[in-house]
Image (cartoon, helix red, strand yellow):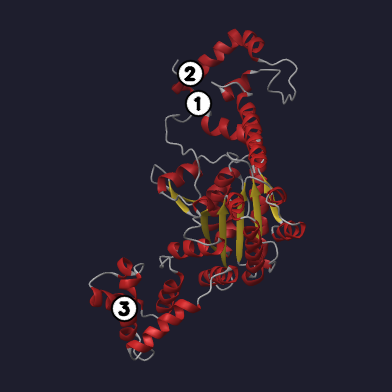
Amino acid sequence: MKLIEIFEKKPTRRISRVVMVDQHEAEVIRTEVEEYVVTNQIRALLQDFIDQFLETRMGRVSDVCTWISGFFGSGKSHLAKMLGYILTNREITFEDGSKVKVADYFNQKHGLKGTGILSKELKTKAFLYNMLKFDRARDEDLSRYVYRSILRDLGLSEVPWIAEVERTLKEEGVWEDFIKAVQDETGKTWEEIREKEVMMRPALVKALTIVKPETYPNLMIAQQAVEDQRTELILGTERLAQRLTQEAVNLDKKQGRVVLILDEVGLYLRSAGTSGLTELNSLAEDLEKIGNGKVWIVATAQEALEHVAPEMGARRDQIGWLQDRFPLKYSLAPENIPIVVNRRLMAKDRTSAAFEELKKLYDENGGQLALATTIKNPAHDEGLFSRLDFESFSESYPLLPYHIPLMIDIFARLRAKGRRMGQETK
């Protein structure tokens, strides 16, 4: 028997070590959706969130902020990504060429309810960003980083004031004329020059006088208008909330929804300090107030909200604000990890000759194996350490049933020890 012959799927297939919420290549998406393991806890979590999300159809606007916690490797990034795909009912293509919508797929495969309403009664767009990519040298704060990222995803310039000009030209129906005017004037495309201010400013001013002569009759007036746009645009949580709300309205005035998914917010907050906590609180407040139920935010972190804030030295009132702002809190249990590993990586082909051979070997050597591998008087016995049966053995083979839980406990303790040492060093 060769070990590779016993698995349901090839263990040599490409499996990303880390799920990135902003990675959307077709092959990656297909694998992550098809192989996503929905445990009982995750199914209940997804169902509760969808039920809450659907309630906004009835006018409820308060509970739009969600906090998902789980230590590194617990699957929170994968969960957040699937949540974005389910809410938008993103279409994927399987290897055989068949196409399926993610919400429909989760309904059929995992029994998730309410998914049909998501696509029929709501029009949702998700913006998914990895806060590990936050660059303080370029983006001063959370709002600026998210705003730039949204502009990029919308195909606009990442320079906010230029993006506002682009958006206005598109809304006024002169975008194509503008593009042509820039090309004629510079010999380059607008996309080539819009991030280079030395080349962009003169071309922008000239093109405005061509496509909107009634508004900009000469270069001086156009130049002053451009300068006003550049200096008067103020970015902050309120402006970001307005931008997201407008995107929801653009989808549909009544049914449009936008979901902002920010992965690893906890690590961002650690680098930003209490100012980051204040800004996150302000953003959540503005999204609730301005979004009016149309804009949701989902934040993930390794720690629960009540744990991450005190560790950063937040005041009691700041902690209270954040807890109030994020009424929907979900924590991924460590018990999910062994289930996911066994189902996704260790799943066996029970019809294979290799599986039959394994069963035969166990029948012949099960007693000796149990005697050699079980642990006497473990501190915590979840039924994995002190007894062995073929079902649990074959499920985790070639590992023993307690190997994954044991590794989880070891890594959690090492991580906690490392944090304490870091605090003592400070």
Disc 2 residue type (three-letter)? Ala
Residue labelled with disc 1: 349
Disc 1 residue type (three-letter)? Asp
Q: Secondary structure at mark 1?
A: loop
Query: Which is nearer the eye, 237 or 374?
Result: 237
**Residue 354, numbered circle:** 2
Q: Residue 24: x, y in percent?
A: 44, 51
Query: Which is nearer the eye, 88 or 314?
Result: 314
Q: Quadrant of the C terminus?
A: top right
Q: Does residue 60 lie above or below 205 as drawn?
A: above
Q: Residue 297: x, y in percent?
A: 61, 59
Label 1 near label 2: C-beta < 8 Å? yes
Q: Secondary structure at mark 2?
A: helix
Q: Does residue 143 lie above or below 267 as drawn?
A: below
Q: Does residue 27 lie above or below 158 as drawn?
A: above
Q: Quadrant of the N terminus?
A: top left
Disc 3 residue type (three-letter)? Pro
Circle 1 packing at 10 Å, graded few (<14), some (14-19), many (20+), is: some
Residue labelled with disc 3: 202
